[in-house]
Structures are given as structure tokens and as C-alpha cells.
Image (spheres, rainbow, N blue to C red):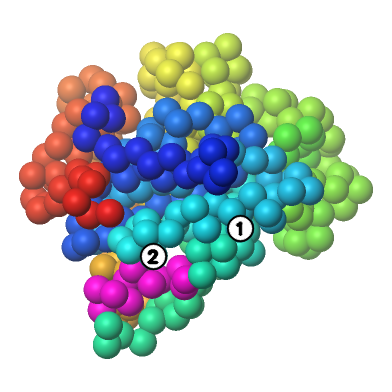
Amino acid sequence: MYEKQKVLEIKSDGVLLGYIVVDSFRNGLSFGGCRILNDLRQEEVQELAQTMTKKLFIHGLPIGGSKGGVIANAGGLDIEDILYRFGQSARGILDNSIVIGKDLGATNDRIALIYKGLGSRQLTPVQKKFPNSDLPEFLNGLNGYLPNMTALGVMYATLAALGREDLKGVRVAIQGAGAVGRGAFFRFLESGATVVGMSDIENCVINGSGLKREGVEKGVQNGKIDVECFEGSDIESSQYLLSTDCDVLVLAAGSNTVDGQVAKNIKANYIVEGSNFGLKLDARDQLFERSVVVVPDIIASSSSAAMVCSQMGSGNQLDGEKLWKDIREGIFKSTQACLEISKHDKVSIRNALNQIYLPRIASEFDFQWGAETQL
């Protein structure tokens, strides 16, 4: 499945610190997030790297797809040292043709520690390709970089699936209180939706009239919900959120958090995967049998990668406003095309995407798989 990838083990003094997996190159560059997990598996990083290439296909494959992973407890006392040594050990890789960014457990500050250990700027590989460009030091300085970018794409995917221009009257529940989940709350609120519930790893808050902006601003921080900030809301265990009454369920927590048994209790008619692999395979099958529309992560969580990769592939020369219009169009086009294929061929939207839509558009691009010659 991953035989074309290049898997790089990052070691320090013989100790395995993590991986960088290159799935594809285009224009001499490759990009992906870098997650930090104590139980990180190589296969997980490989699957995520492949998914990154697929996400970028949807937006014209401006550069190739990769993924990084650090084996560490993101909240551990030694995390700073581990990240610094990871960067030191990745010299010749991250300062050549690969750029890594935020992911699960990896904040901007933690990514900065990796590059401090590397002794190089995050965008050094791009600077080498565009030596005369005025590039920022980090991704968040690129033209068009916005708050809650992944969440904005999740909202676009929801609009596309529902065939609407706004979400007025739509009831939404959000699994996850991290960067994507919290960001999704504000993006959905902007589009007129009523967010009736939100969860973290322990609790969920439910309010049929809608959660208030001020409650989320104050009470949702660093992936945790302070239930005392939600007076008048019902407080339940986190799993309760998945069975709450809503139109759209947004998955914005960890990977493989919903199995087939849990999926049986989902009441939403639409599920949008803001996290990578939010649904397990048996859940996907169960929901397809019930005709629940599931917009997969490859589409729904592609927007931030599309934004930074488009600017990296252009040397930061694109107009930010136009770029976001193109990203919206890419998400709408792929969502609606896969919905049509799904209905016509009687397959899930994810299978329509992987088996028909992506192979069709992949033929349009000149790219190469993760070849050692690029490193």
C-alpha cells in the first residue's frame, strides 16, 4: 500500500525519536503536519502522508505530500528536549525539500522548537526554490494565512454537502475542543448555524438553544472544556455528544474515535470529518447502510494544507483573497462530484473519492512519489 513512499527514521544516539514519511514530491517540495503522540506508529504516519497527497490533489497538487511524527508525550516534561533533538537529527531533510507544520499535539511553538534544533527556518526549502522571494520565517506569515483555517474548510465542506450558501437553522454538534473543534464553533456560528453541543475527551456541553460565543471563548481552551462557563447547559460524558439530536456532526477530535457500535447511536444525517480518520471502517460501513452522508477528511480538512502549499509552490506570490476563493471552489467541486458518484455507483462518498474521483484528477498532474533522489 505504501511501497512508493520514503520512510525516514529520525534517531538521536540510537534512540528512535519519530519519523518523516515522504509520499510525493511536486515542484521539488513536499509538505505535511507533524503530530506528537506517545504511542505513535510508523504505519499511522505513512497513512497520513498518503492522505496529505490526496488532500493536495483536490487543490491542484501545488507541492507533494508528507507527514512527520514525534514519539513523545505532548504534555511531558521532556518534550522540549525531544523536539530540539528531533530537529537536530533531521538536518539534510527539513532544510532541503520538506516542510512540516502543526498537527495533533504540535503547536506553532513546538514546531518552532524543532526548527530551532535544526538551526534553520521553516521555509528554508522554499527559499532555496525561490531565492529572490520575500518569504517569512514561518508558515503563519504567508499571504492569506487565517485563524481557524482548517475549520473554515470544514464549514465549506458542510455547505457543499447540504447544497447551501449559509447554515441558518442548521443544528451542529462538534466532537473535539482543540484547535479544529474550537475553530469550527466560530466558523459555523459565522455562517448562521446553531451549535447545540461540544465535547472534549471527558465531558460534553449540550444546549438545544445553542452554545454562546462568550462561553466558548472563555470556557474552551487548550482542548479542554470548563463546564462552569456553560451555565444553563447540560453536562454529560463526552460520548453522549455523538448521540445528541443534530443535523450535522463534526468530528474534530483524534483519529478512529468512532466505531460501528457508537455509530449506531448517531442521529445526524450529515457527518463531516474535520479530523484525520475520525471514523473506523466498521463505522463507515454502518453509516453508509443508513444513508448518512459522510464528507471524508481528505476533502473536509484539506483547506489549511491547500493554503500553505499553494503559497509555498508559488514563492508566496498569490493573492490571499483569491486563493481562499479557489480553495472554497475546490472543496465544493470535489464534495459535489463525489456525492454524485456515490449516488450513481451506490458506493460511499469515501470510496467514490478514493476509487474514482482521485484517480481521475491524478492523471492531470506531473509529480513523483517519495524518491530518495529528492532528499
Q: Position of residue 100 (x, y in %)?
A: 44, 57
Horizontal arrangement in the rendering, residue 246 relative to residue 92 (left or right) = right
**Sequence-wise first label, 1 or 2:** 1
What's the residue at 87%, 52% (across, down)? 229
* Residue 129 colored in magenta in the image: yes
What's the residue at 56%, 24% (across, down)? 258
Relative height, residue 30 to residue 238 (above, below): below
The residue pinned by badge 1 equals 84
Residue nearest the viewer, comparing 167 with 76:
76
Relative height, residue 45 to residue 22 (above, below): above
The quarter of the rendered structure image containing the N terminus is top left
The residue tagged with tag 1: helix, strand or loop? Answer: helix
* Residue 22 colored in magenta in the image: no
Q: Position of residue 187 (x, y in %)?
A: 56, 59
Q: Position of residue 91 (x, y in %)?
A: 43, 59
Measure the C-alpha gap from mark 1 to mark 2. 15 Å
Rate crowding at label 2 as few (under 14), some (14 to 19) or many (20 or more) other CA atoms within 10 Å.
many
In magenta, the rendered stretch is 120-130
The residue pinned by badge 2 equals 95
Residue nearest the viewer, comparing 102 with 4:
4
The quarter of the rendered structure image containing the C terminus is bottom left
